[in-house]
Amino acid sequence: MSYVADHMEGSPTDPNVKWTHLRPCDIATFILMKYDITLSNGQIKRILKNNGYCRRKPSKSISTGESKNREEQFHIIRVLMLLFTNMPHNPIISIDTKKKEVLGQLTRDQGVLCKKEGTPKVYDHDYSYLTTGKAIPHGIYDIKHNNDYMSIGDSHETAEFVIENLLWWWNNFGVYNYPEVTQILILCDCGGANGYRHHLFKVLLQALAAKIGLKISIVHYPPYCSKYNPIERLLFSQVHRSLKDTLLTDVNQVADLIGKTITKQGLIVQVRVVVKQYQTGKRSSKEDIAVKKILYNKKLPDLSYTILP
């Protein structure tokens, strides 16, 4: 395997992490030319496996930044999760917006499982002007019931879009699943339409709390820590599987595919399509927040707070 070793690259910090750009056919060609021995790609793969080589997907484990109060905020999240877990009448929901999906006769760098004679035809380039729209899946994951409620929009991801989805979830599902509820805990990222810096999100949350008559506790995951949000690994990974290897042509098709998402653990996804144009660029100031209707955490007020009805 000296030929492979001559074409190895490696991590500058970990001598055990190495990789090669060679393909089995490259190695087979070298052996044929140097030793006049013919080996198939399958034989080369078995030889590589016996020598400890295998294909692996690079691990996204290098953080692009650090959060100053990371550990303190995770401690607050753990305490609130434990507190609400011991109160079965109060829901814990995790919210986020999945990656936007472009629509149209585009490859999306995906293969499609189909019969040979029925190969779908798409454009030869995935240029943005060839798209017919976009699908914006916003999820609300009920941790206690292992259910998800997803709204598929085709306009923009705004704070208004997020709040209206929360109201839809509560009026149609939450109020029936938690008839004795007194408070709701929401886990979310620190950026996007529900970012902790957006005053409009807090203003609309106050309007929501007043409308449903409940306290709403919000905890934001620290910057660069969105992967720990439960909805990411418990829902979005499954939804991605449902949308993979498929041509997405319209919002209703996306909703239908997401609605078929199931797991062995009993995950159920309720889906709706939101046909509404949400205006971007809306602004709100700190003065618009009703001071008497919001309680901030003393240690990390930006990332943890409770909205009063």
Image (spheres, rainbow, N blue to C red):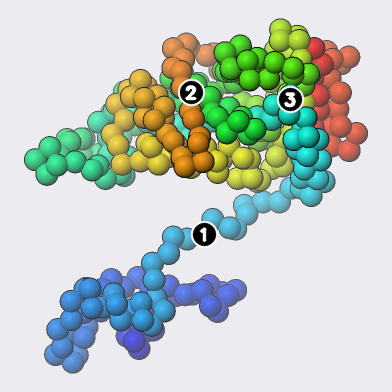
Residue at point 65%, 29% (across, down): 93
Q: Are marks 3 and 2 in contact (CB under 8 Å)?
A: no
Which residue is tagged 2?
270
Question: Outermost residue, left direction?
Answer: 117
Which residue is tagged 3?
90
- Snapshot quadrant of residue 178: top right
Please report whichever mark, 2 or 1, sits nearer to the chain's N-terminal start: 1
The tag on residue 59 is 1
Q: Are marks 3 and 1 in contact (CB under 8 Å)?
A: no
The reply to whether residue 69 is visible in this rendering is: no
Residue at point 71%, 51% (across, down): 66
Please report whichever mark, 3 or 2, sits nearer to the chain's N-terminal start: 3
Other-residue count near label 2 (Cα within 10 Å), few / some / many at <14 / 14–19 / ≥20: some
Image position of 283 with respect to 42: above or below: above
Question: Outermost residue, right direction?
Answer: 298
**Disc nearest the viewer among 2 and 1:** 2
Callout 2: SS: strand
Q: Quadrant of the C terminus?
A: top right
Other-residue count near label 1 (Cα within 10 Å), few / some / many at <14 / 14–19 / ≥20: few
Image position of 283 with respect to 77: above or below: above
- Label 3 amino acid? Asn
Q: Residue 3, image x and y in percent? A: 32, 85
Callout 3: SS: loop
Answer left or right for 97 relative to 126.
Answer: right
Other-residue count near label 3 (Cα within 10 Å), few / some / many at <14 / 14–19 / ≥20: many
Query: In the depicted view, which residue is nearer to us: 292 or 47?
Result: 47
Q: Residue 101, image x and y in percent? A: 40, 32
- Label 1 amino acid? Ser
Callout 1: SS: loop
Answer left or right for 22 relative to 189.
Answer: left
Q: CA distance from mark 3 to mark 1?
A: 36 Å
Residue at point 55%, 44% (across, down): 233
